Image (cartoon, rainbow, N blue to C red):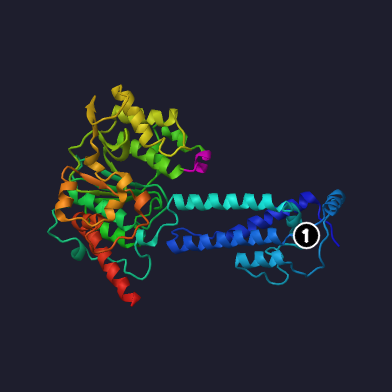
Amino acid sequence: MCSCPWAFGARLWAREVLLLLPFTLRRGKGSSADANAEDGARLTYLFVAASLIISSSPSLPFARRREEVRVGGIACPPPGSTGRAEQIMMAVSGEQAPAGERMLRMPSCLLKLTRVVLSHKPWALFILIVTFVSFVYHKLHWGIWEDPNSRGHPYGLSDEISCAHYVPSSLNIAAGPSPSTGNVFFVETSEQTTPSYLFSCSVESAARAHPGSRVTVLMKGMAKGNTSLPKHWAFSLLSCFPNVEIQPLDLTELFSGTPLAQWYLQPQRYQEPHFLAVLSDACRIVLMWKFGGIYLDTDFIVLKNLQNLTNALGIQGDDVLNGAFLSFKPKHEFMELCMQDFVQNYNGWVWGHQGPELLSRVFKKWCSLRTIKTMSCKGVSALAPEAVYPIPWQNWKKLFEAVSDLELHKLLEHSYAVHIWNKLSHGTKLEIPSQALLAQLYSQFCPATYAKMKQDSEEWARRAV
């Protein structure tokens, strides 16, 4: 028999949990979709294992538990014996500890302590389930577990791109953009460095529509100072366009000298459920204020040159402005007011509060309005929905419906760009080739990306036979 003091035992129990976590969630830099799936599987195994531990805990008589607590010790099984819970934990971790290596083996005293702590099994299981479901929700919500079809094929297909094949030399793009022309900005605030087909199409379509402008893609996942791009077909393809620049996103430097600098340095912000979206909202208004130009989300397909839309943003409908497209001159007062509102009325727990709702609040104050409508007020224009949001988010499935050439022309006659609403549409399968509206947009406005999609689709069809 042995005795484990409660305080010491609790510390050991916590240590064992921390020791188990690295085996459960092992992931290095540059993780792929398969690595994320493996993490999900390990997390699921841990959840199942913990549930089994709870269900396998002996139903000790209440009087006996009280007696053990009163004496301050826990009875331990004979040395060398291995309980069911310990076997489960060793299986989940994927490790088998050598004999004599006790660091990765849960001591029998701790197993007894675990059973006592989880003696109220329904409550313990309820807390475990809530924690697990919350974690899975956030993983799915922010697209860390993405549908493989939306990201392109990570393995087997060549990352090398022939610029002569995908981007003909006849394309009218200057050797380099003029410094006087405005930038077109795309921002990736997650750690992702494996762009999807839609991401590639967004940048390609912008580069083709703005041959005299610099199209800048800022990515948080790229190591600062690393001059080489990650090995991925999308980077190879986009590098064929001389007006495209892909650079690391230094958030501390970007926010410096703005009201958002102190906000970004507050560590509690990282725990908010919509932090990546809020961070993206912050980046776009600071970019517009500091540098000016055009900002686009990475789920836009650009149809026409956007340079003549100055100091403008689009109405998405229902009395709401959307910041997926912004076009402003640098140091514009409207963007300065947006930065001030971002900090003064901050609420990172409500979806859209720092994005569409912020822009709508500021515009109503700017124009002294109750309801937003298509108009120009004090030099800032609210564009009609058909300008950049011709497909309302409520009708996003229309993107995957077949349309005739005449229907497509009529639908987009007054549009400069099309927002694809990737947050809603990313899991939907797109047949390539097809007459689907989205497939036709790919084919016409980002033909290099479309050719890569078609090639990959044919290659995987051959491998499936």
Q: Quadrant of residue 431?
A: bottom left
Tell me where residue 55 appears, x and y as whole percent: 69, 60
Q: Main secondary structure of the magenta part?
A: helix
Tell me where residue 8 appears, x and y as whole percent: 77, 51
Q: Residue at x 74, y 53 (%)?
A: 119
Report whether 200 appears left or right of 59. Answer: left
Q: In the displayed structure, would residue 365 be above or below residue 271?
A: above
Please, which residue is most extreme toward the bottom here?
465
The answer to whether residue 136 is visible is: yes
The kind of residue tagged 1 is Cys
Mark 1, Cα crowd under 10 Å, few <14 / some 14-19 / many 20+, is: many
Image quarter hosting the N terminus: bottom right
Q: Residue at x 85, y 52 (%)?
A: 63
In front of the other: 319 or 383? 319
Image quarter hosting the C terminus: bottom left
- Does residue 270 belong to the magenta stretch? yes
The residue segment tinted magenta is: 267-273
- Does residue 429 belong to the magenta stretch? no
In front of the other: 376 or 179? 376
Residue at mark 1: 109
Element carrying mark 1: helix
Q: Residue at x 71, y 55 (%)?
A: 13
Q: Quadrant of residue 400?
A: bottom left
In front of the other: 332 or 375? 375
Q: Residue at x 41, y 32 (%)?
A: 342
Q: In the displayed structure, would residue 359 be above or below residue 213?
A: above
